[in-house]
Amino acid sequence: MELVQLALRGRVAVATIANPPVNALSAGVRAGLAEAVAKAGSDPAVDAIVIAAAGKAFIAGADISEFGKPPAAPILPDVLEAIETSAKPVVAAIQGVALGGGLEVALACHARVASPAARLGLPEIKLGIIPGAGGTQRLPRLIGAAKAFPMMLSGEPVSADKAAEYGLVDMVALGDVVEAAAALALDLASKGAPPRTADRMEALTPADREAFEALAADATKKSGDMPNAMALIEAVRGVFTLPFAEGMAAERALFRTLVADERSKALRYAFFAEREAAKVPGIEASVKPRPIAKAAVIGAGTMGGGIAMCFANAGIPVTLIETEQGQIDNGMNRVAAIYEMSVTRGSLTAEKRDERMALITGAVGLAAAHDADIVIEAAFEEMGVKKQIFGALDGIAKPGAILASNTSYLDIPTIAAATKRPQDVIGMHFFSPANVMKLLEVVRPAGVADDVVATAVALGRTLGKVPVVVGNCFGFVGNRMLAQRTRAAERLLIAGALPHEVDAAVTAFGFKMGPFAMSDLAGNDIGWRTRKSLGKKAAVADALCEAGRFGQKTGKGYYLYPAGARAGQRDPEVEALIARVSAERGVTRRSFTADEIVARLMDPMVNEGARILEEGIAARPGDIDIIWLNGYNWPAWRGGPMHWADTVGLDVIVKRLEAQAAESGDATLEPSPLLRRLATEGKGFSELKAQAA
Ligand code: T1G
């Protein structure tokens, strides 16, 4: 099928891009577009040209899968120059998303018509790059740098109406957007006006420059060491200081440097890994999810309330169930307070708040779950409680209802065995706060029905989550690997590092918080309770808890939190306690560099990830990375633990693990067979093929 079809509509030539699923600007599309515009331009029967697209998207941008390969002619800037310098008016008919190169195509046109649902944006910053086909040069000239720069810095699209308000589109067409574009194109042709090209400077005034420079200064303060934010500022500043052609050349040079940067490669890797993760090996795309018109959540605590909010935010009525009215009231008040905060912050209208609150109904007793299509249990993390709830739900929930547990590590098959419908029981592990964190681990026990898995994944996407299907084991994937990092952090303290040194190394690596500050925030007693239930020990962590140092909530944990202090402060008492534990073990303490700390924390996580892959608990290394990127704030520009390991080199990681195992005598630090095999073969995790989870 032709990627760009050219058809005459009276004296208007319509070039329609058809490159499903989202009309990415592959080499074939670029060539087709150039050919269509040249052909229409030289056809005496044609007075004007429209660029349109088939399917849900106008154009989703450059074909990201082509990055890193030698650019195939014609490159996009050349195609856009041909459009912009066309002697005949060219109008874009935007019926869906016009993103990245897609919006740049529209910017090279002489006018733009959008459908009401269209969204227009330059999301390149999210991929660690900047627009590379004139976006930084044409958009400011059209709407002013003070409006264009924030669009490019956030990477967020604007609606058709907002685009019209900015002057980014000339018209929002309620009917057929191609027809409206053709009429506008003919009108431009009839005026005989020379097509409007980018180097009109009306929008670029001294006031616009002043506003831009203020925004740029703010962005510089906030952007940390992300090179693409700095490059974006440089490229946009060029519209005030360089002629158009030189500005275009400068933008292209900056773009090409960023495309080659490891950080952009990691972000592009994660873009595709997230989409791969939604494809469940062994479950055909044809398996239909069960319809979910009504939900119920058992447990009105922090997690239950957050999960109920996810349904309300997606417009799905949800019953929030507890054993007593007082708990319902507390849960509903907590939810209302969170929504109120969003209204105060301006991120939610009062009307939307009321709409969402009205979708959440509190109820006492499990019987209220009788008409739900899915029931999600978010009760106390104790197997007895869960078996009792699922046993009761079995007799209440309607046939075909899905029964899911939000447990973060308990055995799903044991929970399912409490019912007569194990094929309908699954794990849906949300991350706290459930209404904010994107990750959803869908835990697939043996025997669960395929359409139940498909429903959990589809529902996860409907709730705005990033669903990843994982196998059933203690801690599933994320928490199982986190346990390795926690053990490694404790080992480091005993070997000679101090909490603030470990946390500093981890935040320098790119995490928002280090493990000890995180533990103080969440509450050290949570891990302490789990270790006790499992009969496990952690000398330093246990000693802190035995001393009542649970963290921020008790004013002291690994750090001191004097009243009103924003961050924890070093506590000599804790450092003396740690030294005592080292002495009791006959350990001669030594200092560690930040690099050594990172290696000692992350290598065991990678090793556990390799075991998770060997056991088939995760289908792909990319699934593990998506879990860490979306559930644990792994720095996005490092692509996740398995991608990071590939950038380090698996042979290096194997050697470091062997040294750690020998030094500590801890056999669990020995490299897993898969990790050792890949290292021996000189391969990376990225060369593993998907397997059924
Ligand atoms: N390139 C290649 N494949 C893409 C793609 C792209 N730009 N966008 C989507 N896909 C694939 C995706 O991998 C999936 O594949 C399928 O399309 C459906 O995607 C020159 C340099 C458009 C809002 O960053 O935001 O232009 O899994 O599941 O939920 O200056 O896709 O089916 O095999 O996401 O309906 C800038 C990225 C590129 C936009 C649709 N553009 N895409 O969401 O579907 S850089 C972007 C999206 C650039 C210029 C620069 C979303 C979407 P598969 P999907 P969706």
Image: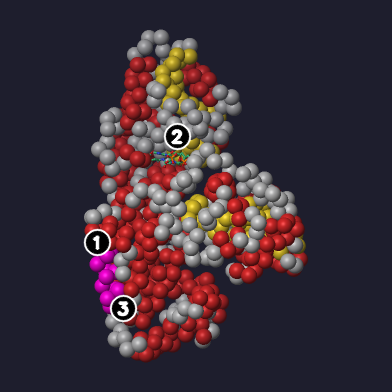
Would you say the beta carbon of the disc 2 residue lies within 8 angstroms of ligand 1?
yes
**Which one is in front in this view, the residue at disc 2 or the one at disc 3?**
3
Residue hosting label 2 = 22
Decide which of 267, 618 is in the foreground and name it: 618
Q: Are marks 1 and 2 in contact (CB under 8 Å)?
A: no
User: Which residue is rendered at x = 59% and y = 52% of the image?
Assistant: 423
Which amino acid is tagged 1? Asp
Q: What is the magenta range?
A: 651-665
Q: Quadrant of residue 160?
A: top right
Ligand 1 found in image quarter: top left
SS assignment at label 3: loop
Q: Main secondary structure of the magenta part?
A: helix
Which amino acid is tagged 2? Val
Magenta span includes 119: no
Residue hosting label 3 = 665
**Cα distance, mark 1 to mark 2?**
39 Å
SS assignment at label 1: helix
User: Which residue is rendered at x = 56% and y = 61% of the image?
Assistant: 412
